[in-house]
Image (tube, rainbow, N blue to C red):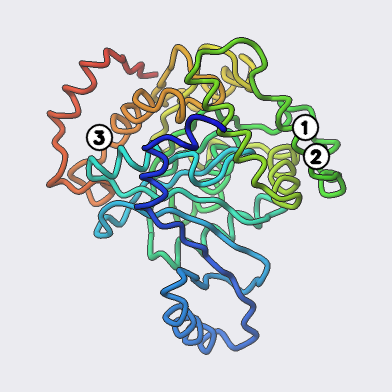
Amino acid sequence: MGEIKVSPDYNWFRSTVPLKKVGIYRIPLSEVTEILFTTIIAKRNRKSKNIIVDDDDSKIWSLYDAGPRNIRCPLIFLPPVSGTADVFFRQILALTGWGYRVIALQYPVYWDHLEFCDGFRKLLDHLQLDKIHLFGASLGGFLAQKFAEYTHKSPRVHSLILCNSFSDTSIFNQTWTANSFWLMPSFMLKKIVLGNFSSGPVDPMMADAIDFMVDRLESLGQSELASRLTLNCQNSYVEPHKIRDIPVTIMDVFDQSALSTEAKEEMYKLYPNARRAHLKTGGNFPYLCRSAEVNLYVQIHLLQFHGTKYAAIDPSMVSAEELEVQKGNLGISQEEQ
């Protein structure tokens, strides 16, 4: 059994932060009646944490929502293909302890980017969140960019943190197979995903992170995996002119990861004014094996919004001076482009 899964931190997280299942039901009523009925059902299901946000009965969102509820522009985490919402448990524990409101999501089965964006928008509407900060890892980062693009006429994304992410699905050279993933059995889909995991020698913390992600991968069903791989490889790219005004931090690693050097360089070109958060090591999952550095970079990114209505932190809990001290202690420099 992996060390992370039996660690005191993970067990503490699972025992203190409830997982909410966001149920989505079909309600064939008029629009006004539907809203009233939604309110009634939400109240009935409050104990089981089931929430109604859509008219499609095949969608189930899972989320961890932690931190002060008075924060109306929280940081939302989107996982990679192999991840579930709890892969960000180290960010949730640390950031909420410092006063941030953090939400980690696990999205339901969506087969195209537009469908995902529409479902995500409805979820935010239900949570009464007009603006959010997004942290996306790999596929999660691509979906975060597509959602910012999707809502550019009525912006919902205030900033982006893109971890080991990409802007064009063609880098995987799988666009021609994207429409056939739904036919593949689960074991074949898992083999495709595992092929991108580090196979060479790694340090113990990275090995534990890989073991944990393999365990999370095993928990996903065939349709979940097939839909995520479809989103990951379906022919699509980010249109930068639609999101050029959004503050961006690009977070990546110098050691081996699933992203090629060319893909990283393309991200730098796409966001010439983005902050760069480089980690010397961390592989595909730095938020698990290099969580202290990742958490610091997240704080540095969010610091620029302190004192505004888009702050993700309770201003009474963490000061900018304390953050600067942490930044100096870790000796991590921020490169502005």
Q: Is mark 3 on a helix, strand or loop?
A: helix
Q: Which residue, given by chain and number where applicable, does mark 3 sit on?
A: 303
| Vertical side of 292 occupied by 105: above or below | below
Residue at the spot 54% in from the left edge and 49% down from the top edge = 147
Q: Quadrant of residue 247?
A: top left
Residues under numbered marks 2 and 3 in contact, where contact means CB atoms less than 8 Å apart: no
Q: What residue type is labelled 2?
A: Phe
| Vertical side of 248 occupied by 132: above or below | below
Mark 2 vs mark 3: which is more N-terminal? 2
* Classed neighbour count for the residue bearing mark 2: other residues with Cα under 10 Å, few (<14), some (14–19), many (≥20): few
Residue 187, which numbered label? 2
Which numbered disc, 2 or 3, marks the residue closer to the eye?
A: 2
Q: Which of 232 and 24 is in front in this view?
A: 24
**Label 1, label 2: how far apart the Cα atoms are:** 6 Å
**Label 1, label 3: how far apart the Cα atoms are:** 40 Å
Residues under numbered marks 1 and 3 in contact, where contact means CB atoms less than 8 Å apart: no
User: Dividing the image into 4 quarters, which one contains the N terminus?
Assistant: top right
Residues under numbered marks 1 and 2 in contact, where contact means CB atoms less than 8 Å apart: yes
Residue 279, position as x, y percentages in the image: 43, 16
Residue at the spot 80% in from the left edge and 35% down from the top edge = 175
Which numbered disc, 1 or 3, marks the residue closer to the eye?
A: 1
Residue 80, position as x, y percentages in the image: 59, 38
Q: Which residue, given by chain and number where applicable, does mark 1 sit on?
A: 191
Q: Which amino acid does label 1 sit on?
A: Lys
Residue at the spot 32% in from the left edge and 32% down from the top edge = 301
